[in-house]
Image: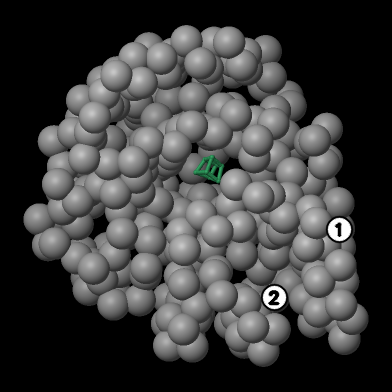
Amino acid sequence: MTYNQSCNLSCDFCYVNFHHKKIQDKTYEIIKKAILLNFDVITFGGGDAFSKKSFRNSCILAKENNLFTQVDTNGIAIRLNDHDFIDKYVDLIGISLDSIGEEYNEFRKSKKLFTKVNSVLKTLDKNNINTKLKINTILTKQNKNAIYDIYNYLKSFNSIERWSIYQFFPLSAAKRKRETFEISNEGFDETLFFLNDEKPNFKIEKFKFSDRVSGYIFCDEEGILYTNSLEGNYIVICSIFDTEAEKKLLNLHELINPKTENRYS
Ligand code: SF4
């Protein structure tokens, strides 16, 4: 489930084509339909689900119907009283972090971003919540020198379960900034080489662009299901509300990315 209408940040390396049109947000109905279709995992993504009105109730509905709930967020709109909500209704929270301190603010063009993320992480860590905590890092040519600092910073927390590092995706909107951000496969491996000898308390996942780009199915907040090709183009499948949706999804089985199919089971 990805919010494609807008985001509270405007990162230059972002691959989401936000359309900023007036739409009817059908997230709650989409979750109802996903329950009927026997989905077992739902990921809320698209920048910051916490900034969307439809998110909290939809996440509660998913959790109360036994879906595994994952939320990927930049952390900006997480409120102090969301910590209980996260503990109760979010199985896995993924928080973005691509650099440390002022450099992170510059990387994502947001003045107090690092202070906010730092405070969210510290609170989640201190509260010893049931929710699994994961950090998502986009590795690009611009922030490759920050990886060592991020690693040292993450080691200061007890409850981080997983650090997922993604090679910059020159997909869709991000194609425009390809020259600025693209990092080669060799550059990606070299930057992360030092991690091979490290034994932190958390799991480290490294995703090259080619490992990850195909085999994902997204649903926008209007219910349109789509995937993307290796060339970075979106391919519309159908609406989740179509009577044929289940059949079409079952036929896509061979496209599901094997790296992700059983990732959290
Ligand atoms: S990278 Fe994430 S936080 Fe940044 S604009 Fe895109 S969706 Fe929003």
Q: In percent of the image, x 86 and y 51: which residue is there? A: 235
Residue 85 at what x, y percent from top left? Answer: 29, 74
In which quarter of the view is residue 21 placed? Answer: bottom right
**Position of 184 compared to 95: left or right?**
right
Q: Is residue 90 above or below residue 121?
A: below
Quarter in which the N terminus is drawn: bottom right
Residue 192 in percent (x, y) is at 42, 18
Q: Nearer the viewer, mark 2 or mark 1?
A: 1
Image-based side of 144 in relation to 262, left or right: left
Going from N to C along the chain, the mark reached first, 2 or 1, is 2
Residue 258 spot, x, y in % from top left: 65, 50
Q: Residue at x 22, y 73 (%)?
A: 84
| Among the 4 quarters of the image, the one containing residue 174 | top right
Picture residue at 12% right of the left edge, 62% below the top: 127
Q: Of the residues shown, which amino acid type is indicated by label 2?
A: Gln
Q: How many numbered dots are placed on residues in this image?
A: 2
Q: Tell me, yes or no, if residue 146 can be seen here.
A: no
The answer to whether residue 65 is above or below residue 50 is below
| Label 2 Cα crowd, 10 Å radius (few <14 / some 14-19 / many 20+) | few
Q: Secondary structure at mark 1?
A: strand
Label 2 sits on residue:
24
Q: Position of residue 71 (x, y in %)?
A: 45, 61
From what the image shows, is residue 185 above or below residue 263? above
- Mark 1 belongs to which amino acid? Val
- Circles 2 and 1, Cβ within 8 Å, touching? The answer is no
**Mark 1, other Cα within 10 Å: few <14 / some 14–19 / many ≥20:** some
| Residue that numbered label 1 is attached to | 236
- Asked which secondary structure carries label 2, the reply is loop
